[in-house]
Image (spheres, rainbow, N blue to C red):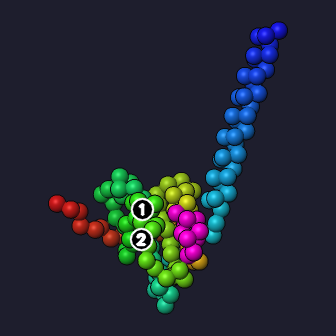
Amino acid sequence: QMGRIGLMVLLVVFALFLAQKWWQRQRFYRQLRMARISPTELVQLTQGKQPTVILDVRTELSRAGGGIIPGALLWSDPDRKMATLDLPHDVAVVVYCACPNDASAAQVARRLMAAGFRNVRPLHGGIDAWQAAGLALEYPAQPA
């Protein structure tokens, strides 16, 4: 009898654990759902009259040896830099990364919107989509 009760308790705890993990994943996917900008739209945006800021939120390791989108600001520590971002809140901000589903870019974009920026979008497909579109990259000088 005690063994059966113990097994039932264990199964209930395991089911609750699975439910919590499912809920966390659903919440994460909801955060990723937002309007994105394509590489060609980004080119058009930067050639237009609206001031545009491009943020590269890849890690230094992910960025090592590769190029960046021309004019992008390197933002490898978004938490620290969020407090020091001194831009008008109506400037267009495009955020990109190199992760599946643009996860890091979408998370940073959400935080920027929460901080009051109104026109923030992740780059659809990130740096990989930029390169696949045949668009140029900059190669910043590496410190000696």
Report if residue 109 lies within the magenta region. Answer: yes
- Amino acid type at circle 1 is Arg
Regarding mark 2 in the picture, which secondary structure is present there?
Answer: loop
State the quadrant of the C terminus: bottom left
User: Quadrant of the rendered structure where residue 116 is?
Assistant: bottom right
Q: Is residue 39 visible?
A: no
Q: Is residue 119 above or below residue 31?
A: below
Q: Is residue 124 above or below residue 6?
A: below
Residue 5 placement, left or right of 52: right
Q: Is residue 16 visible?
A: yes
Taking the spot 24% from the left edge, 67% from the top edge, the residue there is 141
Cα separation, mark 1 vs mark 2, equals 7 Å
User: Quadrant of the rendered structure where residue 117 is?
Assistant: bottom right
- The residues colored magenta run 108-117
Q: Residues within 10 Å of mark 1 (few under 14, many from 20)?
A: few
Residue identifier under label 1: 80
Residue identifier under label 2: 84
Residue 18 placement, left or right of 48: right
Residue 55 placement, left or right of 101: left
Report if residue 7 lies within the magenta region. Answer: no
Q: Residues within 10 Å of mark 2 (few under 14, many from 20)?
A: few
Taking the spot 41% from the left edge, 71% from the top edge, the residue there is 84
Taking the spot 34% from the left edge, 64% from the top edge, the residue there is 67
Taking the spot 39% from the left edge, 60% from the top edge, the residue there is 76
- Amino acid type at circle 2 is Thr
- Mark 1–mark 2 CB contact (< 8 Å): yes
State the quadrant of the N terminus: top right
Tell me, for residue 90, which label it has, or none. Answer: none
Which x, y percent locates residue 124? 55, 66
